[in-house]
Image: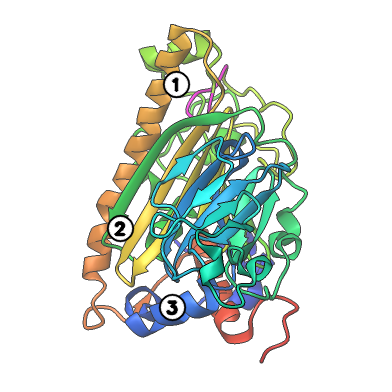
Amino acid sequence: MNQPADTRWIRNYPDLGTGPLPTEPMISPEHFQIERDRVYRRSWLVVGRVEDLPKPGDWFVKDIASPRTSVLVMRGEDGVVRAFHNTCKHRGSKLSHGRCGGGVKGFVCPLHGWVYDTAGRLAFVPDENEFYQLDKPALGLTSIHCGVWEGFVFINLDRNPAITLDAFLGEIRDSYHGYFDGLEEAAHYTVTANVNWKLLFDVSVEAYHVFNIHPIHPVSDEAEKKVGEPPAKPEIKLPNIILHQLHRLVTVPGNPFRPQSPVEQLMIKYGVVTSFTFPEPGAKPADLPVGVNPGGLPAWSFDVLGLFPNSVVLTGRGIYVTIIMWPEAVDRTFFDIRVYMKPVNNMAERVCREAIIAMTRDVMREDFDHVEPQQSALSPDAISHIQLSDQELAVRHGYAVLQQIIERGFPGEVAA
């Protein structure tokens, strides 16, 4: 039986329509090139956290395939976080071949020894008197627009961004104040998969697949309706879908009534409570910023914040996970996945944390086990359009926003 029209999420967003969507954005090399030029080159992209740069002179390099560039991000002696193209202005050599470091006073080009300080200024040129009209002040590293929001470091590769970071964040800008503070990186995974970057994003913002491929995940849409009673049926419906101009959020419910495993009981005993565990059936979440569990769901597991264009942030109790998707080709993507949790104080807490990290890793692997075969099956001879349910509305929104940016630019931008 179809869901009654008056209970469908589409009623809140009728402009998105209900028809099938073409598969071209997932498989077309031509469409992929357009995304590189009109979306990735012009959007604000997450490249790291301020915790990666705790002190002046700390730095990291982010190599980006689409569009191809190497980015050097560093905290200057003045404490300001800046981003530059990782390219020496002498003859275009790569300035730093490392991944990250700390406490530097500057960078020396490994080819000819040009020296740049932590603000990107050209500080020293060997045999400077051998050059003709050398304008050192004009030969600093090429800067990249850089900004910080709630500890996330963003860059924009456009020389003249069409939208400010504040405007890009839009409705979510003031919704997460302090939520990401006090948690540390607990695990870091990288995966290069033969899949279009959007497919993992899509499966991240819907829960239609959960009972089919994530048997460990404690979810049920009945948990909110009958707090105090176990859910009766293996079904999940998203209790909250919020679609913004660029970004989207879905809330995934939890099931605090299923039997806890011994390690989960240990987690509860030592207070290492995250989205996988609950202190007691029906317990309400602690006070959180308005952007986290915005519906106030008692049996809440986590939210999925989809940041346009390529970042997913899972926000839960005592944990958040970032998944950044860096496309390399239409059917190949580099995924950077990081898990953040509270610092541990003893061995029991460490055991609990490692168990949660393993559970998170397994859920990610289950997704990858399905999206790679999905990519290989997306032949234009086999399927030209995909069908989306009301529960997959955030997927539909993602493709609508992508097409809007490609065709008309960012909100408020005057089309060329």
Q: Is residue 360 above or below residue 156?
A: above
Q: Is residue 352 left or right of residue 9?
A: left
Q: Relative to 89, does residue 338 appear above or below in the rendering?
A: above
Q: Quadrant of residue 46?
A: bottom right
Instruction: Name the residue that disc number 1 marks.
Output: 353
State which tag comes first along the sequence, 1 or 3.
3
Q: Is residue 245 magenta?
A: no
Q: Which residue is mark 2?
A: 371
**Which span is picked out in magenta?**
274-279
| SS class, disc 1 | helix
* Mark 1 or 3, closer to the camera: 1
The answer to whether residue 217 is visible is: no
Measuring 46% from the left and 49% from the top, which residue is drawn there? 323
SS under mark 2: helix
Of the residues tagged 1 and 2, which is closer to the observer? 1
Numbered circle sitting on residue 135: none
The colour scheme is rainbow
Residue occupying the point 56% across, 77% down: 132
Quarter the C terminus occupies:
bottom right
CA separation in Å, label 1 and label 2: 28 Å
Sequence-first tag of 3 and 2: 3
- Mark 1 to mark 3: distance in Å? 42 Å
On the image, numbered disc 3 is attached to which residue? 20
Task: Between residue 222 and residue 81, name the one nearer to us.
Answer: 81
Question: Which quadrant would residue 407 be assigned to in this image?
Answer: bottom right
Of the residues under marks 1 and 2, which one precedes in the sequence?
1
Q: Which of label 3 and label 2 is nearer to you? A: 2
Identify whether 208 is placed above or below 303: below
Residue furthest to the right: 174
Outermost residue toward the front? Answer: 129
